[in-house]
Image (spheres, rainbow, N blue to C red):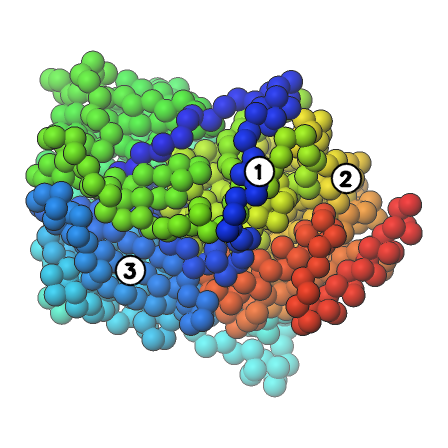
Amino acid sequence: MVSKRAAAAVPQLLAAAFLAAQFSSIASPANEAGKRELTPADAIATVRVMENQLYPGQRVSDAGTSPDGQRYLIRLAYGDVLRNGVWMDLLTGRLDSLDGAAHPRRCAHLLTTGLGSSTSGQSADADPTPANFIRWLDDTHVAFLWSDSHAHRQVMSVDLMSCKHSFLTASPTDVFSFASTAAGALLVNAQIPRPDGNSRQLWARGFTVKDSSDGFSILNGNIDGANWVGLNFENRWFISSHGATRSVEIAGNRVDFSNPFFRELSVSASGRYAIVGVAPAATPDDWTRYQDLTLQRLLKNNETSVIRSPLSYALIDLQTGTTSLLWDSPKPFDSQVRWSPEGDTILLAPTFLPQSADSPAGLKGTAAAELDVRTGRYRVLPLDMSGRTVVSAEWSSPTTIQIDTTDATGADVQTQRFTRDHGVWQASRTAELPLGAPTRASPIHIEIRQSLNSPPEVFGVDARSGAERLILDTNPHLLERFKLGRVERLSGTLPNQRQWIGQLIYPADYQPGKHYPLVIQSLYGHGFGPEEFTLDGFFGDTGMGLGPSALASYPGQLLATRSIAVLQLAVVHPSSGVGQAEDYQLAFETLADQLSASGLADRNKIALDGFSRNGYFVEYTLSHSKFPFAAAIAADNYDPSYSQSALANWRDIDEQMNGAPAFGDGLQQWLKRAPGFNAEHIHTPLRMVGQSAGIEVIISKWEIYSRLHYLKKPVEMYLMPEADTHPSHTPQSPKQILAIQEGVLDWFSFWLSGREDPNPRKSDQYSRWRTFRTSAAVADP
């Protein structure tokens, strides 16, 4: 099996009282001969190991080993700037001996544009992501999703013996997910073809604006009342077997309105059943009793949103094509489903339980249970995972289960085993299954070893003798060629008693006692995953730290190589709705104060960087904080200000963030909280970056941009290349990544270090920024 083992120490809890002592103890890597600065093009070309990840930190299945345990598979992804694409290599080798394992063969060398389809918002740009699962069709064939010549994702199969590959589907639209059975059938979920709009005809004959219209659709030229964003998510299910295809209804509906992205399909060992997360047609009244704020928020959003979260399990009978809801219990967002190696029972961890169970853990969604999918009978494991995250949940045998969990910081990793005896699950005192131990026939297994400061290396290990051999160094000489900063994990407590976690990248030329510029990259909804080497600075995106950037606006080591410190920061379990932005403002201010007091950061050269929801936290902080942040970037971000909310037909989440509807007395709350209404308080140079759309992104940010521009504040708005024709919230196209990252590096280097790129094509950029700097100095002497 393929496993990981981190080589670095567990995260440290660093209080402000001894931050200075910690920093002064770090040896400087400066002045090492022959090293040069890392560039965005260098970072794009580095290699990452793709793993089966549903989302950060959650392993879907062991896709690295064939069903018979005799062959392993490794996937590598890396960008190609010259071809403006991303390569994925499939390497395979034998597991009969260390010698056999030590000589992998590249069996596929596939290129994707990374630009994506214009019809679904997730196509080629998702090809090289860890959420693209590998599934074994048999002992020598694997399948995964890959874009065809039309940028539509299809199911591709690779023969690991002949190394030939072919598409198993020919869908006219994107395939979102699939699963295979031992009998050779495919269960496929694909986008419904988008209908032709009739906007042109409506303009020709005149029309009344439909109640279902929204401002963003109208800006995009769609006036027919159809929600074109929602149409990107509508999907249907099919079973394909022996050349025949039949449709599958989900809970009586031919169309599945569930969000199709990032959902796992699980097929039983017998191949008879599959389980998938779906959105319930209507929320059961008694589900309001479940004591999980995230669940209640998602249930409320599902009542009005066209993009509905999958909060129920559907059981699909692959033999009859019929479906039913699994049981009367909601599905946690981060639940894992594991089929028993024998029989038709599953392990759910974590999970809610039916209310008849009268279980506090079941109401909170922190329980674990074994469920018989045929009868609905379940057995509860003696475990409450409150405050913990499931890293993996596996059957060690038909009567033994092992569950690995961690706390929010990732420092406290626990492994617990349970044994079923006479129908009852009990905690087991048996020694834990060793990390990386083989679960199939071969005594040889593959380990991916890395740490915060050591790039991934692939080893073969003989479980019988303990002998091991290096199979692959994914990025040889990376550390010797480039100036990189040392990385450490940090955590602590804010003045409001909420916990923060972070990952600090020291400047590459760090010297104790010297004050450096600092950029705080904000993360929302992240915890510490396993320690991994990353150029971006992430600490929760396992498998996404190298190669094409997962979030292009977060440069991480690209800033450290320019003598700028970087802190990736998240608040653990921030407030929901009102108070969430304040939590992040407090975290930014607290860490800025602590890192400047420690002697690491120059208090007058601290900047903020926020992507997506985090961009709102940055804008909120700039419009409400007294801290003198020196520069900021808000990239492709959500903003609960007045104009964006109006264009989106007054989203519920905007009401939650501002504490009231934007009407009557509630408008007073918006005047106090919404960044757009408080733009006059922003004195920090702000760069806005658009990625996920063209004109809609510009207009959505126009409220803040136009106010700052009118007030002669230093502000600019940038749209990445082809944002109108090939938009992406998380671009993978090297051309788009390069453009975003060069702009981010130039912006922070200019405001924090006074550094300018001598490239002549950037002369207008720096002329504009120098004017900003002069006007800012006059306004704030």
Mark 1 and mark 3: span between their CA atoms? 32 Å
Mark 2 and mark 3: span between their CA atoms? 45 Å
Q: Secondary structure at mark 3?
A: strand
In the rendered image, residue 403, in percent from the top left (x then y), is placed at: 28, 27
Instruction: Kindly identify which residue carries mark 2.
Output: 604
Q: Nearer the viewer, residue 242 or 389?
A: 389
**Amino acid found under the numbered disc labelled 2:** Asn
**Amino acid found under the numbered disc labelled 1:** Tyr
Q: Is residue 443 left or right of residue 627?
A: left
Q: Nearer the viewer, mark 1 or mark 2?
A: 1
In the rendered image, residue 37, in percent from the top left (x then y), is placed at: 55, 53
Mark 1 and mark 2: span between their CA atoms? 18 Å
Q: Residues within 10 Å of mark 3 (few under 14, many from 20)?
A: some
Question: Image height check: is 683 above or below 437?
Answer: below
Q: Is residue 646 left or right of residue 322?
A: right
**Amino acid found under the numbered disc labelled 3:** Asp
> Which numbered disc, 2 or 3, marks the residue that appears first in the sequence?
3
Instruction: Kindly identify which residue carries mark 3.
Output: 89
Instruction: Kindly identify which residue carries mark 1.
Output: 506
Disc 1 vs disc 3: Cβ atoms closer than 8 Å? no
Numbered badge on residue 25: none
Residue 603, located in which quarter of the rendered image? Answer: top right
Residue 231 visible: no
Q: Secondary structure at mark 2?
A: strand
Which residue ends up furthest to the top in the rendered image? 429
In the rendered image, residue 1, in percent from the top left (x then y), is placed at: 19, 40
> Which numbered disc, 1 or 3, marks the residue that appears first in the sequence?
3
Residue 593 visible: yes
- For the point 38% across and 59% down, which residue is it? 78
- For the point 21% across and 51% down, which residue is it? 73
Q: Secondary structure at mark 1?
A: loop
Q: Nearer the viewer, residue 640 or 468?
A: 468
